[in-house]
Image: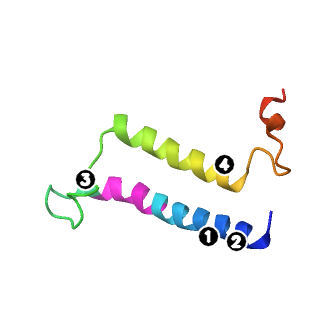
Amino acid sequence: MSERATRGIAITALWLGVCLSIFQLWQPIAGFFPPGALPFEHILGLQGATYFRPTHLGWILVLGYLLYPVARDGSWTRLFDG
Protein backbone atom coordinates (compact mmCIF):
# COMPACT_ATOMS: atom_id res chain seq x y z
CA MET A 1 0.00 0.00 0.00
CA SER A 2 1.34 3.40 -0.89
CA GLU A 3 2.28 5.99 1.69
CA ARG A 4 -0.45 8.32 0.43
CA ALA A 5 -3.15 5.67 0.91
CA THR A 6 -1.83 4.84 4.38
CA ARG A 7 -1.89 8.53 5.32
CA GLY A 8 -5.46 8.85 4.01
CA ILE A 9 -6.59 5.89 6.09
CA ALA A 10 -4.86 7.33 9.16
CA ILE A 11 -6.57 10.71 8.72
CA THR A 12 -9.94 9.02 8.18
CA ALA A 13 -9.45 6.92 11.32
CA LEU A 14 -8.47 10.04 13.27
CA TRP A 15 -11.62 11.90 12.27
CA LEU A 16 -13.82 8.88 12.92
CA GLY A 17 -12.25 8.58 16.37
CA VAL A 18 -12.86 12.26 17.13
CA CYS A 19 -16.47 12.01 15.95
CA LEU A 20 -16.97 8.85 18.01
CA SER A 21 -15.63 10.62 21.09
CA ILE A 22 -18.02 13.54 20.56
CA PHE A 23 -20.88 11.10 20.04
CA GLN A 24 -19.96 9.22 23.23
CA LEU A 25 -19.72 12.41 25.29
CA TRP A 26 -22.95 13.83 23.85
CA GLN A 27 -25.19 11.11 25.29
CA PRO A 28 -24.54 11.77 29.00
CA ILE A 29 -24.56 15.53 28.43
CA ALA A 30 -27.88 15.39 26.57
CA GLY A 31 -29.35 13.23 29.33
CA PHE A 32 -28.26 15.67 32.04
CA PHE A 33 -29.88 18.81 30.60
CA PRO A 34 -33.60 19.34 30.03
CA PRO A 35 -34.90 18.78 26.47
CA GLY A 36 -34.35 21.74 24.16
CA ALA A 37 -31.52 23.26 26.22
CA LEU A 38 -28.61 22.12 24.03
CA PRO A 39 -27.68 23.15 20.50
CA PHE A 40 -27.83 20.43 17.81
CA GLU A 41 -30.25 18.44 19.95
CA HIS A 42 -32.64 18.15 17.02
CA ILE A 43 -29.87 16.40 15.03
CA LEU A 44 -28.25 14.12 17.63
CA GLY A 45 -30.89 13.96 20.32
CA LEU A 46 -30.82 11.54 23.22
CA GLN A 47 -30.82 7.99 21.94
CA GLY A 48 -32.11 5.01 23.82
CA ALA A 49 -29.82 2.06 24.51
CA THR A 50 -31.35 0.03 21.67
CA TYR A 51 -30.10 2.63 19.17
CA PHE A 52 -27.01 3.88 20.96
CA ARG A 53 -25.27 0.53 21.48
CA PRO A 54 -25.47 -0.74 17.87
CA THR A 55 -24.32 2.66 16.59
CA HIS A 56 -21.38 2.58 19.01
CA LEU A 57 -20.50 -0.98 17.95
CA GLY A 58 -20.66 -0.08 14.26
CA TRP A 59 -18.27 2.86 14.72
CA ILE A 60 -15.84 0.73 16.72
CA LEU A 61 -15.89 -2.03 14.07
CA VAL A 62 -15.19 0.45 11.28
CA LEU A 63 -12.29 1.92 13.25
CA GLY A 64 -10.97 -1.55 14.01
CA TYR A 65 -11.01 -2.64 10.38
CA LEU A 66 -9.41 0.63 9.27
CA LEU A 67 -6.58 0.39 11.77
CA TYR A 68 -6.11 -3.40 11.69
CA PRO A 69 -7.11 -4.70 8.24
CA VAL A 70 -7.83 -8.38 7.79
CA ALA A 71 -4.99 -8.89 5.31
CA ARG A 72 -2.21 -6.47 4.55
CA ASP A 73 -0.88 -8.46 1.60
CA GLY A 74 -4.17 -8.32 -0.32
CA SER A 75 -5.07 -11.95 0.37
CA TRP A 76 -8.47 -12.45 1.97
CA THR A 77 -7.65 -16.02 2.96
CA ARG A 78 -6.55 -14.80 6.39
CA LEU A 79 -10.20 -14.08 7.11
CA PHE A 80 -10.95 -17.82 7.11
CA ASP A 81 -7.86 -19.00 9.01
CA GLY A 82 -8.67 -20.75 12.24
Q: Position of residue 63 (x, y in %)?
A: 60, 53
Image quadrant assignment for residue 37:
bottom left
User: For the stretch drawn in magenta, what is the main secondary structure?
Assistant: helix
Pointer 3 or 4: first along the chain? 3
Residue under the point 30% across and 39% down: 48
For residue 60, side relative to residue 74 (left or right): left
The reply, left or right, for residue 72 in relation to residue 34 is right
Report which residue position mark 4 lands on: 65
Q: Earlier in the sequence, mark 3 or mark 2?
A: 2
Dot 4 falls on a residue whose secondary structure is: helix
Q: Which residues are magenta?
A: 21-29
Q: Which mark is residue 11?
A: 1
The kind of residue on which mark 1 rests is Ile
Whether residues under marks 1 and 3 lie with C-beta atoms below 8 angstroms apart, the answer is no
Q: Secondary structure at mark 2?
A: helix
To which quarter of the image does residue 39 belong?
bottom left
Q: CA distance from mark 3 to mark 2?
A: 33 Å
Q: Is residue 43 left or right of residue 3?
A: left
Cα distance between the residues tagged 3 and 4: 28 Å
Q: CA distance from mark 4 to mark 2?
A: 15 Å
Q: Which residue is mark 3?
A: 45
The x, y position of residue 26, in whole percent, is 35, 58
Looking at the rendering, in which quadrant would you find the C terminus? top right
Name the foreground residue: 9 vs 49. 9
Query: Within 10 angstroms of label 1, few (less than 14), some, or many (20 or more) residues?
Result: few
Looking at the rendered image, the quarter that the N terminus falls into is bottom right
Q: Amino acid at mark 4?
A: Tyr
Residue occupied by mark 2 = 7
Disc 4 to disc 1, how far (Cα)?
Answer: 14 Å
| Residue at x 61%, y 70% (from the top left corner) | 11
- The earlier-in-sequence mark between 4 and 2 is 2
